[in-house]
Amino acid sequence: MSEHINLNEGRRLFGLNPQGYEDTRPDYPIWIFDHLRDRGALVDGTPTLEIGAGTGKATRRLLDYGANPLTIVEPDARFAALLGKAVNAAPAHCRVVHESFEDVVLSDNQFDLVVAATAFHWIEPISGLRKIKRLLRRDGFVALFWNVLGDVDKEDLFHDATHSLLAPLAVGPSENPDTVPFALDRAAREAEANAAGFNTTEYRESRWSFVLTTDQVGKLYESFSHIQRLDADARAKLLDELMTIADTQFNGKVVRNITSCLYVFS
């Protein structure tokens, strides 16, 4: 059985190469933000909390759609420079706090929207949602969304070609090999929301694909927690092997499937 990365370690594993993370992690589909706007969850002047912003891929969209003021809780200070660029270019009032969500002290009943983009799986779900509920104003919304690498209904040739290299590595605390990914386990996520006191749950998803060059494969995989935690030599060797497969078996053109999913709780 694969080793599990504990929550404390996992929250601080992503800042090894912030620019590489920014350049190769796919953007979130615009429909997510459009839907939040249409639901009335994200409009001009929405007091918003974002958990685990990373380099600010979702942050920029939140600001564009009216998040203001925006409070950002990001435990890894190595993202500070890129995250600062995202918020400093916006007219909104923004505050960045480099602490874990569990440890940060925030006043209750101050946000109309709390967002976590590909981050909530690093938080214990029910206690995390209960804290979020305390922070929300009455009739506020929670938006949890992910870009999940893979599509359960589509063949993934690069995944198959690299499985033997990646299978021995540790997995996140919420994951188990050969099971439904945390983000796509709708029944579990909605049950946790109900247990935390949310009355309404909504789920939407889209499936798409993107193409990576050999160099982009290396940068993308370097940004994954189970690879970042390797020592420098082991990490370099693994990334070289992944890039060699991309180059020799896929001619430097790797197609990866993505499932983007959104949960809205209120």
Image (cartoon, grey):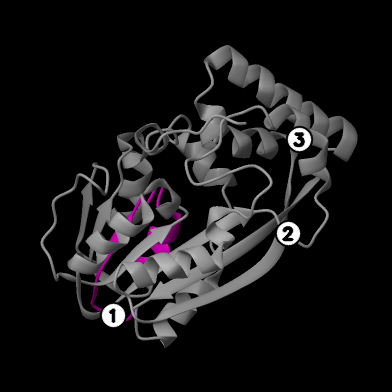
Residue found at x 26% / y 63%: 130
The earlier-in-sequence mark between 3 and 2 is: 2
- Residue 64's x, y, as percent? 38, 70
Q: Is 174 placed above or below 163 here?
A: below
> In the image shown, does 223 or 19 lie closer to the viewer?
223
* Kind of residue sitting beneath label 3: His
The Cα–Cα distance between marks 3 and 2, rounded to whole angstroms, is 15 Å
Q: Which mark is residue 152?
A: 2
* Kind of residue sitting beneath label 2: Val
Residue found at x 35% / y 47%: 83
Q: Residue furthest top?
A: 233
**Number of marks drawn:** 3
The residue tagged 3 is: 163
Looking at the rendering, the stretch of residues picked out in magenta corresponds to 42-63
- Residue 85's x, y, as percent? 34, 49
Q: Residue furthest left?
A: 107
On screen, residue 39 versus residue 31, left or right, reads left
